[in-house]
Amino acid sequence: MKSILIRNIKSLSGVRDANVRLVSGAEMKILPAIENAFVLIENGLIKAFGRNEGAPERADEVIDATGKFVLPTWCDSHTHLVYAGSRENEFVDKIKGLTYEEIAVRGGGILNSAKRLAETSEEELFDSAWLRLETIQDFGTGAVEIKSGYGLSYDAELKMLRVIRRLKEKSALTIKSTFLGAHAYPAQFKTNHEGYLKILLGELLPKIADEGLADFIDVFCEESYFSAAETDRILAAGVKYGLKPKVHVNQFNVLGGVAVSINYGALSVDHLEHISDEDIAALKNSNTMPVALPGCSLFLKIPYTPARKIMDAGLPLALATDFNPGSAPSGNMNLVNALACINMNMLPEEVINASTLNGAYAMNVTQELGSITIGKKANLILTKPVSSLAMLPYTFGDNLVERNIIG
Ligand code: NIG
Ligand code: FE
């Protein structure tokens, strides 16, 4: 039984009751905190916290946090961090003026990553993903969702999901896995959508459910990818196999994917660079978390998700990296938070709530993560000495996380 005491904390931020599962609208401006605080960790869980005067005398390890903040680790609820190779050639093409869609038409994009992934062994995939996990841990991430979707065949999708399962087994981070076989139609099924859907729904889903290889199901609902009607069919099948939907919607076009996702009880709808009044109204009558991915907006030079419009409607919002080789080759949640402040007019308190508690909600781990709550996992960010938490997004591109304590 190992205990860690962190004392003399300048501010212990994100303190919440266990029954608070998410924060919405104007509440997102509030980040409850205790000044001059201590927190006691036992067996990887938050055992006690409060004002410094009440701190226990001893523990196996004592950390002095004078001048430093402690807050819950980031919950990055949307990534594609298992992938093969990289796509910096497309990055250069983009600089020369090609759009994401033009690059995809030329055989770049998701299909390019799928080709490389098919040629890469499970071992190599695991090793490269492991390095990415180590990198995001340094940035303060304590939980991460990882999608398949660069396999796009029976064997390669299973290979990706098995890599994610191994990451879950080996890493101390909390990891959730999502089946995104419906990421793009492989070239040979371009005009035979039924053929591909038969593999996804008839062969892969039963196998994945049987082996417990995924927690969630996702679809890229977008023009030239999966229509709203196809999304409906795929989510219906996923739900039948016990997979909760988390769906790519409204990245370039509003196709009605938000309403379809909500209809199947989606945990989250992600991207939302475009959002209609109907989408907002539907979200208000749902338990679905909107998720913004500002790293993707930066990298693709597409609009940012209208965060103020969403929060002003009284809705919650989560932030995630979308870490992937094509549209967001960075897993840095600190940068995501800075982008949300700079380009989405979110306040520092709002981005911290969006990246901790609401992120935890969007990957179904609020019971154990996302806030400073007795009994939750002690996945905690210890900052460098800083004058206020606004310093984190203010120093964009920097990393003021001194230590990421995982349990
Ligand atoms: O979330 N939008 C779809 N999927 C990824 C991009 C994937 C890629 O380009 O490789 C995204 O942005
Ligand atoms: Fe994505």
Image (tube, rainbow, N blue to C red):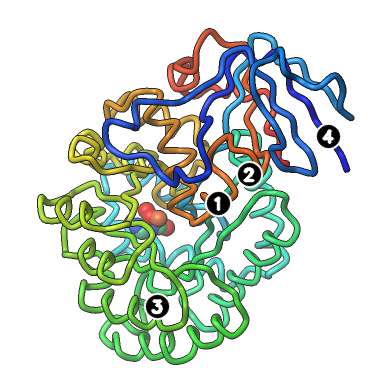
Counting residues from the start of the chain, the first of labels 1 and 2 encountered is 1
Secondary element under disc 3, as helix, strand or loop, is helix
* Residue 183 picture quarter: bottom left
Amino acid of disc 3: Val
Q: CA distance from mark 2 to mark 4?
A: 15 Å
Report which residue position mark 2 lands on. Answer: 376
Residue found at x 28% / y 28%: 343
**Lower sequence index among marks 3 and 1:** 3
- Mark 1 is on which residue type? Gln
Residue 273 left/right relative to 86: left
Tell which circle, 2 or 4, labels the residue nearer the N-terminal end.
4
Q: Which of the 4 image quarters holds residue 259?
A: bottom left
For marks 3 and 2 on the same chain, the one whose residue lies earlier in the sequence: 3
Which residue is disc 4 drawn over? 3
Between 72 and 295, the one lying in front of the other is 72
What residue occupies the far left of the structure in this picture? Answer: 277
Q: Position of residue 203 (x, y in %)?
A: 48, 90
Position in image of residue 318 (x %, y %):
38, 43
Residue drawn at 19 percent across, 35 percent down:
312
The reply to whether discs 1 and 2 touch (Cβ–Cβ < 8 Å) is yes
Q: Is residue 238 left or right of residue 3?
A: left
- In this view of the protein, can residue 257 be seen by the observer? yes
Residue identified by numbered label 3 = 239
Asked whether, in this view, residue 250 is left or right of residue 361, the answer is: left
Q: Badge 1 is on which residue?
A: 367
